[in-house]
Every structure is written in C-alpha cells, then in structure tokens.
Amino acid sequence: MTALAHDGPVIAIFASDRGPGDPERANLMSEVGRVFARKGARILCLADDGAIPVPLITAARTAGGVVEVLVDDGIALPSALAGIPVRMLAGAENRQAYLAANASVLVGLPGSLASATAMFRSWAGAARLPVVMLNRNRAFEAVRGFAVDVMAPALPGYDRHIQFADNVEDLWNKVVWVGEQRR
C-alpha cells in the first residue's frame, strides 16, 4: 500500500458534508482544499459511512492539488468526483492504519460527529502522529480545554502533538510547525 507519488507533505484531513454541524463547513472545506493544494500538500481523506467531503476534494483538485480518497467497499463516489484516485480498503481499521502509515499529520475540520470520531480513531491508532484541529466556531473547544487542563500538566511537550488553529492560514502554519517538530 503506497500513497500517490508527490513531494509535498501528506495530510489526512477529516471533514464531513453530512449531518448536523457547522453550517459554514462546505465553504470552510473548500478554503482548506484550495490553500493546502496551493501550498503543495497531498491530501488523504476518508469517504465512508456515506460521508464524503466533496467540497474539500473538489476545491483541492481545482487548485491543482493531489488528493487520494480512502473508501469502504460499500460507497460510490458521486460523478462530480470522477477521476479522483480512490483506494478501497475494507474495514475502518485498515483505512485508519493506511492513514497512520502514510500521513505526516492529521487535520480535523469542524463538521459532524462522524468525521470527529474518524479522526480520533485514526489518531488513537497512529503512534505519535500529530493532530491539528481547526477550532472555528469553537468546534473543538472541549478538546482544547482537555488539552490545557489535563494534558499540559501531565505530558510535557504535548503541544508538539496537538494544536488548535482559529483560521485556515493559522491551520496551515501549525501543520507545517508540527511537521517540523517530528523531524
């Protein structure tokens, strides 16, 4: 199982376009897709349980980015995503293992509980893989509070593994920073 050939950092982005959640998430996904593609990132994303981050994928590809979608065996991508490289891996644990083996950082965007759950499952299975969450509209405020109140006193240097951003440019800068910390 090898990822797409490309020189930029490989970033696994967790986002969802279904269910209740942030009403601005489609615009936010598009902005992240454009910015990350223009910065040279390779994007890995999940399309499972019926959740497909179409705005993220479309915007990244339109901006010339490289995107690979990991799917379960029961999902069909919409025709708007024809030509997108797809890797079918049965079982959520296999998709999460692929992400952990190929990504340099995990990124969580505000969205549904399904995308947040997938991100945390992948994070739990990825030994020492950093995660950066876009805390737009306080989407990850509970996690941020936990990090400050529980992780900070117990785990020196936790900030090299978990970061929170308030906007998309800050998100990119923190993704780059945590990537440099791993070297």
Image: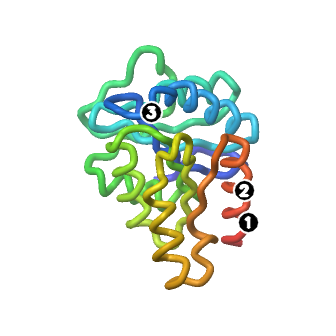
Residue 19 image position (x, y, % from top left)? 31, 30
| Residue receiving disc 1 | 180
Marks 1 & 2, CB-CB < 8 Å contact: yes
Say which residue appears at 35% left-offset and 29% top-offset.
18
On residue 22, which mark appears? 3
Q: Secondary structure at mark 3?
A: loop
Q: Secondary structure at mark 2?
A: helix
Q: Residues within 10 Å of mark 1 (few under 14, many from 20)?
A: few
Q: Quadrant of residue 33?
A: top right
Say which residue appears at 39% left-offset and 66% top-offset.
124
In this rendering, is residue 134 above or below 53? Answer: below
Type of the residue with mark 2: Val
Say which residue appears at 57% left-offset and 36% top-offset.
67
In this rendering, is residue 57 above or below 131? Answer: above
Type of the residue with mark 1: Glu
Type of the residue with mark 3: Asp
Disc 1 to disc 3, how far (Cα)? Answer: 30 Å
